[in-house]
């Protein structure tokens, strides 16, 4: 279990996190959702004990990260957003070396490596040096490494980045497996449609604050799907009259979410062109729809 308790983080004048609290229970995948810069990576770095919170604390398996870091992170597998491996060593050798820290024999580590490297699309690259791996490969290697010691808790920071569809499917299965084994998984991703298939609960972060926590069940029930979103530079009353012709529009800040969208995208975009369209697209999933609603309410 990972318990995040009222953590705040300041970088000079910037408040990166403000009073963030949530708990990831055993047997649960918690999705961590927010725009770029919302504070997801900072939260994970604090949980992993590599960044100190300005205030607040985190408990992993009941151990305080600030006061008993060693005990706390012993039971944590962390896949960073941008893993750095500058080691001048071959991937497999480094994997075996890391396994040694956990008392895993060379033969056992090699067997484990074979299984994990293959599942993560790294087969055939075991003898490449880590410094020559691409960012995506480093990410997948970090993922393999995080699983060596079979920890009870995981932090996956944007792990779907750099994975092909096969890798994403691997991850979906892995999440289910970890859940069944009673692990606690915190999983950040901006691929919301995929997260929807993986997470049990979602915690939404916006500008360093937690704005909502929901179960996937609640998300499935409360969203209407099949919506279209369009963000304009400016809006007025006439905009909504135009949007009504295409479904049931709701205005959030400068973004219109049209639920039950029917009509053609080209027609809508030309009707609204004088408002300068900043961004538009189908809302691909319930989670995406709820996310845009939530942040729209807070702009
Ligand atoms: N080491 C740092 N020094 C200064 N500002 C930082 C540092 N790390 C992160 N930030 C800032 O903190 C905020 C949150 O960043 P981050 O946690 O990386 O967000 P996310 O992972 O959600 O994209 C951003 O405004 C970012 O620029
Ligand atoms: Mg990040």
Image: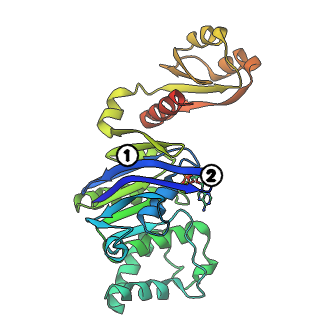
Q: Residue at x 42, y 49 (%)?
A: 20
Read off the residue under disc 1: 197
| Spot occupied by residue 275 in the image (x, y as percentages of width and height) | 73, 19
For disc 2, the marked residue is 13
Instruction: Tell me the quarter of the picture where residue 119 sits.
Output: bottom left
Ligand 2 is located in which of the four quadrants?
Answer: bottom right
Disc 1: CA contacts within 10 A as few (<14), some (14-19) or many (>=20) = few
Identified at 31% across, 62% down, the residue is 59
Compare residues 74 and 127 and report the one nearer the observer. 74
Pointer 2 local density, CA inside 10 Å: few below 14, some 14–19, many at least 20: few
Q: Relative to 108, does residue 270 appear above or below in the rendering? A: above
Quadrant of the rendering where the N terminus is positioned: bottom left
Percent position (x, y) of residue 217?
29, 36
Q: Element under label 1? A: helix
The residue shown at (66%, 8%) is 238
- Give x and y (percent) for residue 79: 46, 66
- Assign the C terminus to one quadrant of the image: top right
Q: Is residue 71 left or right of residue 142?
A: left
């Amino acid at each position: 279990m990972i318990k995040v308790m009222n953590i705040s983080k300041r970088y000079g004048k910037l408040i990166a996190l403000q009073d963030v609290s949530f708990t990831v229970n055993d047997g649960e995948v918690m999705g961590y959702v927010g725009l770029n810069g919302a504070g997801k990576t900072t939260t994970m770095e604090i949980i992993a004990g590599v960044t100190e919170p300005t205030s607040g604390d985190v408990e992993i398996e009941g151990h305080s990260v600030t006061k008993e870091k060693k005990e706390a992170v012993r039971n944590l597998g962390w896949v960073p957003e941008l893993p750095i491996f500058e080691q001048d060593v071959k991937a497999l050798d480094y994997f075996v070396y890391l396994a040694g820290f956990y008392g895993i024999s060379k033969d056992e580590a090699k067997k484990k490596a074979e299984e994990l490297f293959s599942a993560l699309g790294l087969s055939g690259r075991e003898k490449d040096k880590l410094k020559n791996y691409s960012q995506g490969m480093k990410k997948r290697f970090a993922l393999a490494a995080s699983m060596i010691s079979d920890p009870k808790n995981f932090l996956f920071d944007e792990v779907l980045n750099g994975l092909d569809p096969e890798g994403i499917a691997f991850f979906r299965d892995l999440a289910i497996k970890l859940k069944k084994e009673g692990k606690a998984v915190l999983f950040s991703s901006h691929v919301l449609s995929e997260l929807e298939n993986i997470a049990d609960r979602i915690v939404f972060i916006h500008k360093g604050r937690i704005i909502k926590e929901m179960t996937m069940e609640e998300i499935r029930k409360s969203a209407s799907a099949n919506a279209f979103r369009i963000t304009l530079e400016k809006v007025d009353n006439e905009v909504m009259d135009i949007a009504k012709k295409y479904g049931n529009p709701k205005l959030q800040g400068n973004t219109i979410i049209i639920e039950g969208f029917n009509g053609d995208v080209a027609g809508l975009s030309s009707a609204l062109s004088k408002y300068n369209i900043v961004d538009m697209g189908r809302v691909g999933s319930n989670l995406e729809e709820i996310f845009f609603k939530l942040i729209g309410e807070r702009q």
